[in-house]
Image (tube, grey):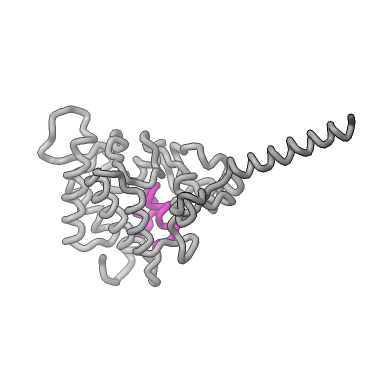
Amino acid sequence: MASETNCLIEQRAMAAGESSSESLATVADKAPITAKRNVRIDLLGTQLPKPYLPRALVAPDSENVDGTWGHSHNNMSVLQQHVAFFDLNNDGIIYPWETFRGLRLVGFNMISSFVLTVLIHAAMSYRTLPTWLPSPFLPIYVENIHRGKHGGDTGSYDTEGRFVPANFEIMFSKYARKVPDKLTLREIWHMTQGNSVAYDFFGWAASKVEWGALYMLGRDEEGFLSKEAVRRCFDGSLFEYCARMHKGATGKTL
């Protein structure tokens, strides 16, 4: 009787083990894309506590569990922090001339700054307005910036503008193949393609423009966009850093 009981216990343990391994599987044999864009689960839940929990105030990852050191969140959501640098007079409203000036401060030349300003405010202004009436000045309201979230993004922001560390880590796990914590321009292209939603032409174009601008701004001398640069773009501290560096630099602008 005891041996039969032990046998049953062993069988249940083996079954539980098999079930557990299957429930944690990130690759399905009949879906080759899941192997091509595999997810490294070793970074999730071990180095970073509760990576699935959306963070309202900070943008942490597995190397920076408390977010960006020395960066003040000012009780704004991470998405609000992302755009706050361009609110030059801190009145909660970003006008096109502020965006243009902010882009110049971080190192973009006049042509790039003008084109990006037109695209950003044409796409984002109306969705963030507190009224239904459009404004000829195309302002962007920081308080409502979460309304500007578009399809085909990485999911690193949730619909309220909080930062989701798990989705940020998964992005690099899937697409950073040449160097685990850096993205090449080709990998960025594949990522934006992979995140695109059917018939969402605006989301497709917006992702290409956003990531293209970030690559121009944050790439290193070897042509890589580092994980740290991307993370700091999400909380806006990258813009502050680039503005400081550009102010003391004598090199060319982007």
Judged from this view, the residue extending furthest toward the top is 131
Which is more toward the observer, 38 or 156?
Answer: 38
Q: Residue at x 41, y 61 (%)?
A: 183
**Picture layout, residue 246 above or below residue 154:** below
Which is more toward the observer, 198 or 247?
Answer: 198
Left or right of residue 9: residue 214: left
Report the predominant secondary structure element of the magenta stretch.
helix
Where is residue 41 shown, x and y percent of the image? 56, 49
Where is residue 222 shown, x and y percent of the image? 40, 71
Q: Residue at x 22, y 46 (%)?
A: 201
Q: Quadrant of the C terminus?
A: bottom left
Q: Quadrant of the N terminus?
A: top right
Which is more toward the observer, 2 or 108?
Answer: 2
Q: Which residues are magenta?
A: 225-242
Which is more toward the observer, 48 or 217?
Answer: 48
Left or right of residue 208: residue 55: right
* Residue 226 within the magenta-colored segment of the rendering: yes
Tell me which corner region of the image, top left, top right, bottom left or bottom right, holds residue 197: top left
